[in-house]
Amino acid sequence: MPATKNTTPLIKWLFYMADSNLILSQRNSEWCGHGPVLEQDIALTNMALDQLGQARAYYQYIAHLLNQDVQSPEQYTNEDELAFLRDNRAFHNLLLCELPNGDWAQTIAKLFFFSHYQYQLLNMLTQHEDDTIRAIAIKSLKEVTYHVRWSSEWVIRLGDGTEESKTRMNNAIHYLLPYLSELFNPADYELSLKAYDIESLKEKYIAAIEDVLEKAELPIPVSFHINLIQQKGGKQGLHTEHIGFILAEMQYMQRTYPNMEW
Amino acid sequence: MFAINKYYYGDIPDGGGNTSNAQFSAENEWPLWEVFIRHKQGLDHKHVGSLHAADANMAIENARDVYTRRMEGVSIWVVESKNIHASQPEDAGSFYDPAQDKIYRHPTFYDLPDEVKHM
C-alpha cells in the first residue's frame, strides 16, 4: 500500500483534485456504449478521458513528491498504485463526483456543476507559484473550457426544451444542489495552502451558474440554495455509499491480478 | 385502453396501432449534417463524413468529438445534408461522357521547358 498517511497539506489537496477527476471520469465512462446517440456517447467518453488524463497528472506529481522521502526502492509508489490500491477513506473526491449518473439530465448537471467549478479554480491556479501545478492548470483549462461549454449548452437545451426535458433538468439540479456547498467549505488542507481565494471563487461560480440557468429558463437562486442543505465529507474521505461500488468496479483488476499492466 | 408490450433486444415494433414506436421513426431523429474538416492552415476543407445533431452548434461540437479526436483538424464546417443538391446518377451519360473525346482540353500538347517546375 502506498504511504498516504502523515502527508502534507499539498499532497492532500493534490489527492482532492486527482480523486475528484478520477471518480467523475469513472462515472462518465459508465455511459460508454449507452449514450442517447453515437455522437453524444463519444463526446462524453472524450470528456471522461480528459478527466482521467487530468487525474493522472496529479497522481504522477503526488508519486513524485512521496518518492522523495522514500528510504528504499521497494517503497516507491506510482500513479497506478495511488488510483487502484487506496481504500475509500483515503479518497478525497467531492461527493458531487461520486453520485449516480441517473438519467441524461443528471449526468449533464453533475458535469455542469463540476466543470464550472474546475474552470474558475483552474483559472486561479494558472497563477500558482508551483511550476507543476501551474502547468497542469494551463493544460487542463483548455479541456475544461470545452466541458463547460458542452454541459452548459445541454442544460440550456433541456431546460428550454420540452416539458419532459425541463422537468428532468429541474429535478437533476435540485437533486445536486445540496452537494454544491462542499465545493466552497474549505478543508483543512485548503485553508493551510491558501492557494486560492475561496470566497471569490464562490462568487464567480454562482454568477456563472445562475447565468446559464437563466438562459435555460430555470431561474433557480443557487446562491440561496447553496447554503440551505450542506452535504459534506468527501474532501475529508467521508463518502456516500456509492464510492464503495465505484471502487469495487474500478479497482477490481488491479487487486485481483496485482501488478498487471496493459 | 392500452396494452403493455414487452419488447426484447432486437425487436423493433412494426407500425400500426398506437404503439410508442414514434421514437424510432425518422421524424424524431435529429437532422443529418455533412462535416468538412480543414486539416492544416492553407489546405481546403474536405468532406469527412456525416452525423446527427439538433442544431448547428451541436453539429460542430459533435464533429469536433467524432472527427478531430486525433488532431485531424484546425477548422470545421458543417452543412445540413438537406441543403446539399447532388447531380443524379442517371445524368452521368449526358453530363460526363461528352468530355471523353475532347482530349484537346487537356494541356498535354505543349512542350514544357525543363526549368518550369510544379506543373
Image (cartoon, coloured by chain):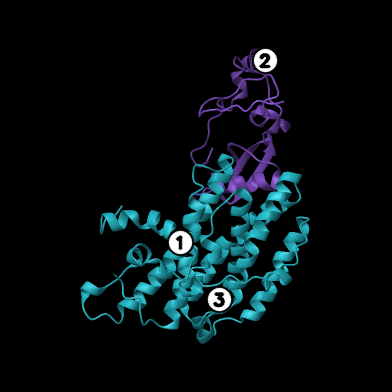
Chain colours: A cyan, B purple
| SS assignment at label 1 | helix
Instruction: Tell me the quarter of the picture where residue A198 sits.
Output: bottom right
Left or right, A155 with reference to A86: right
Q: Position of residue A255 (x, y in %)?
A: 29, 58
Which residue occupies the foreground of this view, A250 or B65?
A250
Numbered disc 1: what chain?
Answer: A
Q: Position of residue A111 (x, y in %)?
A: 59, 58
Give the residue number, with chain letter if any, for mark 1.
A243
Is residue A167 positioned above or below A70 on the image? Answer: above
Give the residue number, with chain letter if any, for mark 3.
A125
Instruction: Residue type at mark 3: give it.
Output: Leu
Q: Which mark is residue A3?
A: none
> Mark 2 and mark 1 in contact (Cβ < 8 Å)?
no
Residue depicted at 61% across the width and 62% down the height: A145
Left or right, A189 with reference to A85: right
Give the residue number, with chain letter if any, for mark 2.
B91
| SS assignment at label 2 | helix
Instruction: Using the numbered discs, state the Cα–Cα distance from disc 1 to disc 3 in whole angstroms.
Output: 28 Å
